[in-house]
Every structure is written in C-alpha cells, then in structure tokens.
Amino acid sequence: MSSSGIDRAFERRLATLINTREPRVLQNGLKGVEKESLRVSPDGRIEHSPHPQALGSALSHEHITTDYSEALLELVTPAFRESWQLLQYLCDLHQFVYRHLGEQLLWATSMPCMLEGDADIPIARYGRSNIGRMKEVYRLGLGHRYGRMMQAISGVHFNYSFPQQFWPVLAEALQKRNAGQDFISDQYFGLLRNYRRHGWLILYLFGNSPALCESFVRGRDHQLEKFAAGTLYAPHATSLRMSDLGYRNKSQAGVQISVNGLDEYVRDLTAAVSTPHPEYQKLGVKVDGEYRQLNTNLLQIENEYYSYIRPKRVARSGEHPSQALRRGGVEYVEFRALDVSAFDPVGVNQNKLRFLEAFAALCVLKQSDPIEASEQAHLDANHAIVARRGREPGLKLNRNGRSVELRQWALELIDSMRGICELLDEGDERRQYTAALELQQTKIDDPDRTPSARSLQELRTTGESFAQFALRMSRVHKAYFLDLYPPNEQRLAEFSAEAEESLQRQAALEAADDMTFDQFLVKYFAG
C-alpha cells in the first residue's frame, strides 16, 4: 500500500462486490454481544454478595454469567442477523436481571466504582465441580499475576461473522478458485491484521473512559491529572481502559502472538501456555495445600492472552480454543476494545454495532500484508497514544513509518467505508448504515462530540466526581429497565426457566465428577 493511504487492491475488491449479481452480499452477517457490568450497592460500592440464585448458575448459564469477580456480571446474547434483535434481547436480559437485584445496581461505566484495593474485589465462584474449581483457580492466578484491580474493569465485546454468500464473491474478486474454510480463515486473519493497523479508530470514536476514580490507581504511577475530588483524568484521553493503566499493562509484554495466519497464531498461543515464566514460578502453584494459579506458564490458559480482537470458533466440550480453530478454522471474530457506554442503558447502541459491522468489512477488503515485529511495535504505539491522547489537537500517528495526522487518516478510513455502507443499506430506504457512518464522521470533524469528551463535559457541567456521575447514570439505567412497559413476559419466563435449568446442570456436573481436582488438571492440560 502506498504511504498516501490509497489502497488500489481495496478499491478493486469493493468494485467487484458492488458489481456482483448479489447486491445484498454483505447483509445478514451474524452479530452477538457480551456485556460486562459490576454489581454495586446503592451507594456505589462493589457488591460482596454471591451471584443471585434467581439468575441461575454462573457456571452453566449460557446468557447470564460472571467474569473475573463474583460481582462482575456478564450478559451474553445469541447471534442475530439484525442489530435491533440483538439489542432487544440484551434489553430483555437487563430487565430480567434487574427484577432479581433488589437494591443493587449495575455500574454504568467501564472503569470501576470506589474500591478499597485488591482485597475488596471478590473472585468469582463456580461451585464444587472440577471445572468450576478450575475457573476459580484461574482467576486466583490472574489476581496474583496482574492484581485484581485490572480485572474489575468492564467492557463490551462484539462478535461478528460474515454472511455465507460473501465468501464466494470475495474469492472471485481475489481470483481464488476455492472459497472453502481455509480461504475463509485466511481472510479473517487479514481482518485481524488490519484491525491491528486501524483499530485505534474504534478507541477514538467509542472510547468512553477518559476519567476514573482515584482509588483505581492508588499507590501506582499513573501520570493522570486531578479533575475534581476523587477524580483523575487525562485531558485528551479516549479510553483509559485500553491504555497502559488498564488492559494494555506491561504484564503481558513477553507474549507476542502472530496473526499472520492460523498456523502461526496457534503455534504462538500454544508456546505461551506451555513456557514457564520465572516470576510465576516464584509464586508457586499449590502452596500449603491451596492453589494460587493453574500453572507457572506465561499464560495459564489461552483466554488469558489479552488482545483487541480474537479469532474464534465455538469449541466442543473439553476442547481448548486453539484446538477448535485448528479443527474447523475461524468461524467469527470477537471485537474486544469497546468501552461500556454510560449514555446507553444496555452499554451499546445500534449505530455503534452498524459501524463495527462496516468496519469489519473494511478490514477484510483492504490489502493486508503480514505484520513484522517492527511494524507491530508501531501499531501498538498508535493504539496506546489514541487511548491516552486521542482528542489532542493535531495528534499524529505512525502509518507505514511516516507521520500522519489522526484526523486525516480517520477521514480516509471513513471515506473508504461509504461504498461498504451502501451495500449494507441495499434495499433499505432508511440507509441506517450510512447514517451510522455519517454520525462517526461528525466526531472526527468535532472531537467534542466523542463519548469521551461528552463524559468530561458532563462532569464539568454537573460538578460531579467520576463516581457520582457513574452512580447517577447507573440509577437512571435501573429506572429505565424497571419502568419499561410492556415487559416481554414470554422472554422473561424463558429466562426464569433457563436459570432453573442451569442450576440443575451445575448440580449434575458436581455429581458426575469421578476424579480429584489434581487429576482433572493433569488430564485437562494433557489436552
């Protein structure tokens, strides 16, 4: 690709899609969301109560579970072809959860509530079964390795797969004879590489964590400025969640996973979960009869690797993620860089999801050469700069070794997406994808329209601290869900039945265990 940003290969591929006999070639891709929220008390403190029984088993419920902490609720939608169906389901899930939370609230922002250090964050519990104990010990290990504070951050993950009719058309555009699974996996890895190149745009447009409660960084070097009592911020930050203070901390600096192809990805991930790390060896695995971590390797299990985006395939029972990928290839991708939006009751909205769908198509259609280590360092730096300083006037990023203004590059990417949005809008007079794209362009033209700037403006206008603002929005969202009328009683009844069934499944798992936990771990890692 030329340093000016003109991508002739992309233009040719897009023209092929536009001229195809299938004008709806990009429509009806499958979309799903995983949304995390901390359960907090009415005054905004992290909850120490167990996961509510009425919500079912966090171990075996498909749609309502927990992440790191017993208080970190995770709501998971099935895959839908339409964004509105997905958001309706997510809304129903929230309504069901709120019926069983009593006075508790779901914290409305990515950065956590007021915390009294690591000891204040309860680790999730999954019962007495071996698999449940493994999940708990894994979390103990995360706490020892990275500290529990980082694990109290919430996010929104967007899962996406292209429609089946897209692949033969793309193969034709690329003059490939076979549009089978190997081809599809290769194209998804092209998307992953381009997301590493261009994903900083997602932080700029949707990042909504420019400020945080000072309890989050107590005792750490943070280089943040004082905003108000109890509140720290970076003046031009978009997403402190995705900065070096959050998920991009230096703890995983030694873990380099290639996305130059499925084989390299699996090779690197397998190495990371089987290579001992001196620091983790010092911690020990089982000390005085109590587990501290699952093992002493760079990663305990594959899911420990934190990345902005992951290739995924639904795993079979007992199968590791990389084994699933090796067996069947890439089925979908998981976008992991979205902050929870304080301005949306379910933490995300249709415009954002539509933009991400179009952005996925951009990343798969653009030229996507292999990423060498030197380029990866520049790409990581671009993400880190935008997370901390994304709204800074005149901010420059590194594109192919040259300095380019964020604004210019962002507008070029938006411009490239127009034809994609027209394809996604084909047959829809409302042109909702194009409208979503235009909305994002306004944020590039005027950084004050970004969610991160809106959040800071809200704090300035109200005089609230970060914690007060987040608590107020959490109460607003709770009222919204409890007042929704008419509720979808049929779906709420389905959720109740699912909760009961999940408790029965957990009990069955616990009754079926026929080996000790030590034996179970040996068998699991022999995989």
Image (spheres, rainbow, N blue to C red):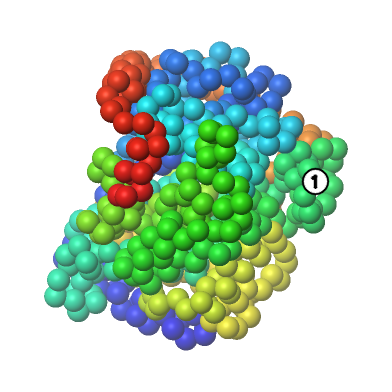
Residue placed under numbered mark 1 in the picture: 219
* 375 over 216 or under it: above or below: below
Can you say whether 498 is above or below 455 in the image?
Answer: above
Which percent across, then down, holds residue 104?
60, 19
Can residue 209 be spotted in the picture?
Answer: yes
Q: Quadrant of the N terminus?
A: bottom left
Pinpoint residue 309: horizontal percent, then vertical percent: 45, 57
Residue at the image point whose x is 58% and y is 59% from the top: 278
Query: Which residue sits furthest bottom?
Result: 2
Residue at coordinates 52% horizontally, 73% vertically from top-left? 376
The amino acid at mark 1 is: Gly
- Classify residue 259 by image quadrant: bottom left
In which image quadrant can residue 479 be found? top right
Q: Is residue 62 left or right of residue 236?
A: left
Between residue 82 and residue 492, name the one nearer to us. 492
Label 1 SS: loop
- At a point 57% along the width and 52% down the height, the residue shown is 280
Identify which residue, 349 or 272, lies in the foreground: 272
Indicate the quadrant where residue 389 lies. Answer: bottom right
**Left or right, 222 with reference to 397:** right
Q: Residues within 10 Å of mark 1 (few under 14, many from 20)?
A: few
The image position of residue 372, as x and y in percent, is 47, 78
Q: Nearer the viewer, residue 381 or 282?
A: 282
Report if residue 452 is visible in the image.
no
Residue at (70, 55) in percent of width and height: 237
Provide residue 465's location: percent of width, then percent of height. Answer: 78, 36
